[in-house]
Image (cartoon, rainbow, N blue to C red):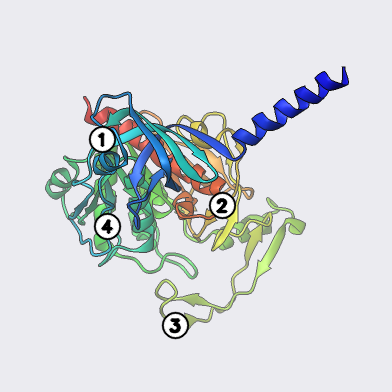
Amino acid sequence: MKRVAFLIVLTLALTCGATFGAERFENVVLHPAAKSDESLEFDGNRSAPFASDVVVSDEASLGIADVATLLAAVGKTPDFDAARPGDRVGDDLPDALVADLTLEEGKIMTVVIKSRQTRPLIGITWTGASVNASQKRIATAILRNGGRVKFMARVANDEECDAAIAELDGLVMPGGADLDPERYGEKPYPHGSVGIQPDRDVSDVLTTRRAIAINLPGIWICRGEQTINVALGGALIQDIPSYQGGRAMKGEIPADQTKTLPDEGAPTDYGKGPVVPCVPSHYRVVAYATPHGDSRHAVDVAENSKFLAPIIGVGVSPSFVSSHHQAADAARLGEGLTVVATAPDGIVEALEYQANDFALATQFHFESDVLSQAPERAELCDKFFLELLRFARMRSSR
């Protein structure tokens, strides 16, 4: 009896030892590694070298029989550092390959090609004279998850907008400076809207309205979320600490749930200009321990969410990067928009235009985690882009 037990334990030990360190990934998108022909990127944010005895098999009958033909079918990593308005990136990439992979001790042991997917073209609205860090992160995520990118030039009228958007299968509108409050019937006030760029306001509002009108799949981020609200007739909270201070003075927020911010004056040009002392000073607070500038906080996703909930679930989510001082005003929502997520202090964190196939706007910067060293954050970030690409691919195939 003891010998039988010993043999069972020994067999289990040998079996576990044989599979120790093994990982399996199913239906992942393959992407060329940026710096090596001896490795491969996959599943959005992962990469690994090939084992010397790697086995490549092709269930999709694409003629891929070994590492050399696999790398040729995956293509080369595009360089978009010198991109300018109107440039397209990824047109030279072959259709995206989807595969099952097995890794042992960090090396790719088997690759089974399952299918090939077309690469939808996703427009990224232009933010400045050159590609900034946010646009690079967004472009990186789109390319490695099976898409192509167009860095969109700004448009000044409906005709330019129609021409720019006609070839797109999807859209991402990144963050940036404040919108002109005159667009929602207000004037700038201390700590309120600064750094206004009228030509960008025109371009982003036109692009948003057209994208919604033609049911173009899209994600609007930070300023983008504010833009979709304004473009559809809504308004913004110009300064969250001032707004929360007003609520605290009315007794809507308990005093023990606020932290007063020192009023050292308001910048005249989005932090670039001189600070103008405020006389009298303004009552600005952080409510419920939720700072919105250069911080991280969780968001609470509502059950009525159509687009966000399938990505991150219902209820309190993991934390996301927060970097803003304005927000969509829940009391003045754009036509057709639904609030589907809030911060712990009640500020709107996500809007959806649920009449469309996929139109999601987030105040939080999920794209900041594209290159995160924390795997769970990078994976969560990729889910947003995979969902956008799924709807964009459906649109392109119609």
10 Å neighbourhood of mark 2: few (<14), some, or many (≥20)?
A: few
Looking at the rendered image, the quarter that the N terminus falls into is: top right
Residue 281 sits in quarter: bottom right
Residue 274 shows which numbered tag? Answer: 3
**Amino acid type, callout 4:** Trp
Residue at 64%, 48% (x, y): give it: 344
Lower sequence index among marks 3 and 2: 3
Question: Mark 1, mark 4: which one is toward the viewer?
Answer: 4
Which label belongs to residue 374? 2
Give the residue type at disc 1.
Answer: Ala
Which of 102/3 is in front? 3
Tell me if residue 156 comes above or below residue 119 in the rendering.
Answer: below
Residue linked to disc 4: 126
- Mark 3: secondary structure: loop
Between discs 1 and 4, the one toward the N terminus: 4
Furthest residue in direction top, as rendered = 1
Amino acid type indicated by mark 3: Pro
Report the Cα–Cα distance between label 1 and label 3: 41 Å
Mark 4 / mark 3, whichever is N-terminal: 4
Q: Nearer the viewer's eye, disc 4 or disc 3?
A: 4
- Under tag 2, what secondary structure? loop
Q: Position of residue 262 (x, y in %)?
A: 63, 74
Q: Can residue 356 be seen in this view?
A: no
Q: Image quadrant of residue 63?
A: top left
Using the image, tell me which numbered label, if any, was put on residue 213: 1
Q: Distance between the residues labelled 1 and 2?
A: 38 Å
